[in-house]
Amino acid sequence: MSTLPKYMTIYTDLKQKINTDFYKINEKIPTGDDLAIEYDCSKLTVKKAIDLLVKEGMVIRRRGSGSFIKGKSTNGGAIALGPTSGLISTVGKEHITSKTYQFSIEKPSNEIAEKLEIKDNGYVYKIIRVRYVNHAPYSVEHTYMPLSVITGLEPKHLESSIYNYIREELGFKMQRAHVWVRGDKVTVEDCKLLDVDKDTFIMEVEKIAHLEDGRIFEYSLTRHDYQNFVFETVFVQN
């Protein structure tokens, strides 16, 4: 029996059907009512699955007409993350665990202060944690957040989603992120925390994230084993 949440099972099945031409490009997919009957679930569960396909650019909704196939996925079975998507919102909370190796408040280096646009006497949270998907190491995160913007952060928030804390408890809206993706040689820390050998190739994601009001709330470096990494984005021409 699958351990995935129902909406992820539906998402995976629909994605496979799109990639194998069961549903053709530009074809209208069944309605939410029909899919709910087919998958024996609620319309809300179906909507969550379709939402993921929309985010990936595979499905487009047309007001008053329904949902249509827009394109195929290029990421195989890997987890695709966009610039502002969190791992929990993509995979599901029940599949994610975290282990925090460092949580401290300190003066940032000049480089970090410049990235976060912190003035003199500003402090940051420094967080190093490993994220696991279904108990397998997925990524190592080095995250810096200014205390002047993200207040009240505690170790308990690191066990689940920092982004959920920012949205739900602080009431902030995250608007945009500037992201750089690059390949890198493995480090001693990577070998230890990701359980990879010294010849493994690493993919690193550098990110500066902004709130709706323009303030920078995060600078991070996240490192992945290349075999588990896909970064997917969709360009839409207006």
Image: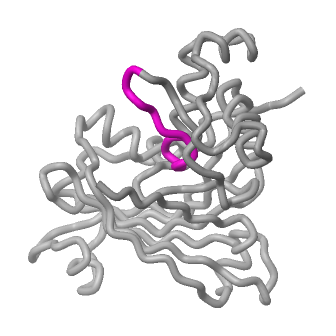
Work out whether residue 143 or residue 9 is closer to the camera in this orientation and state it.
9
Q: Is residue 143 above or below residue 5?
A: below
Q: Position of residue 29 (x, y in %)?
A: 62, 28
Residue most toward the right? 1
Please identify the quadrant where the N terminus is shown: top right
Q: Which residues are magenta?
A: 54-64
Residue drawn at x 60%, y 87% as measured from the top left? 184
Q: Position of residue 173 (x, y in %)?
A: 25, 42
Q: How many marks?
A: 0
Residue most toward the left? 120
Picture colour scheme: one colour
Q: Quick check: 136 left or right of 58?
A: right
Q: Is residue 36 above or below residue 158?
A: above
Work out whether residue 61 or residue 100 is closer to the camera in this orientation and state it.
61
Work out whether residue 116 or residue 152 is closer to the camera in this orientation and state it.
116
Residue drawn at x 28%, y 48% as measured from the top left? 174
Q: Quick check: 47 left or right of 194?
A: left
Work out whether residue 66 or residue 135 is closer to the camera in this orientation and state it.
66
Q: Position of residue 125 (x, y in %)?
A: 33, 62
Q: Is residue 58 magenta?
A: yes
